[in-house]
């Protein structure tokens, strides 16, 4: 006798992983993180026998759906329209020291 509630059949772990397109280990990670609901049909305390409904999997997918939007507060680099010319020379450390010692009069 049915109560009039439409229920979807329960899906084992391997089928749920296939449905999501991920590995069984990944699905277990989602369950452990509390991101994915499951039904424990086993009686053991240590090993869970997880089953999933298609509705729970669909809800998980909708929650995890993301749209990539660029951050509004990041300033994009603007390329400068003018060129700059630097008028500097590269002088080695030893050349600078030699200039200082040569400039000092010897006693």
Image (cartoon, grey):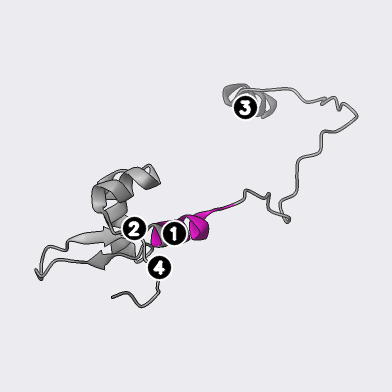
Q: CA distance from mark 1 to mark 2?
A: 9 Å
Q: Quadrant of residue 9?
A: bottom left
Q: Residue at the spot x=28%, y=63% of the render?
A: 32
Q: Nearer the viewer, mark 4 or mark 3?
A: 4
Left or right: residue 18 compared with residue 78: left
Name the residue that disc number 1 marks: 60
Mark closer to the chain start, 2 or 3: 2
Q: CA distance from mark 2 to mark 4?
A: 26 Å
Mark closer to the chain start, 1 or 3: 1
Name the residue that disc number 2 marks: 30
Mark closer to the chain start, 4 or 3: 4
Please say if the residues under marks 2 and 3 sit with CB atoms less than 8 Å apart. no
How many residues crowd mark 3 within 10 Å: few (<14), some (14–19), many (20+)?
few
Left or right: residue 72 compared with residue 20: right
Mark closer to the chain start, 2 or 4: 4
How many residues crowd mark 1 within 10 Å: few (<14), some (14–19), many (20+)?
some
Q: Nearer the viewer, mark 2 or mark 4?
A: 4
Q: Residue at the spot x=82%, y=25% of the render?
A: 87
Mark closer to the chain start, 4 or 1: 4
Q: Nearer the viewer, mark 1 or mark 3?
A: 1
Of residues 78 and 18, the one drawn nearer to the viewer in this rendering: 18
Left or right: residue 76 compared with residue 99: right
Name the residue that disc number 3 marks: 101
Q: CA distance from mark 4 to mark 3?
A: 94 Å
Range drawn in magenta = 56-66
Name the residue that disc number 4 marks: 6
């Amino acid at each position: 006798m049915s109560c009039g509630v439409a229920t979807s059949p329960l899906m084992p772990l391997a089928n749920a992983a296939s449905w999501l397109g991920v590995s069984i280990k990944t699905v277990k990670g989602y369950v452990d993180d509390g991101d994915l609901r499951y039904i424990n049909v086993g009686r053991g305390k240590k090993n869970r026998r997880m089953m999933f409904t298609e509705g729970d999997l669909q809800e998980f997918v909708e929650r995890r759906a993301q749209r990539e939007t660029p951050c509004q507060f990041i300033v994009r680099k603007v390329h400068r329209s003018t060129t700059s010319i630097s008028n500097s020379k590269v002088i080695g450390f030893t050349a600078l020291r030699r200039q200082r010692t040569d400039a000092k009069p010897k006693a």
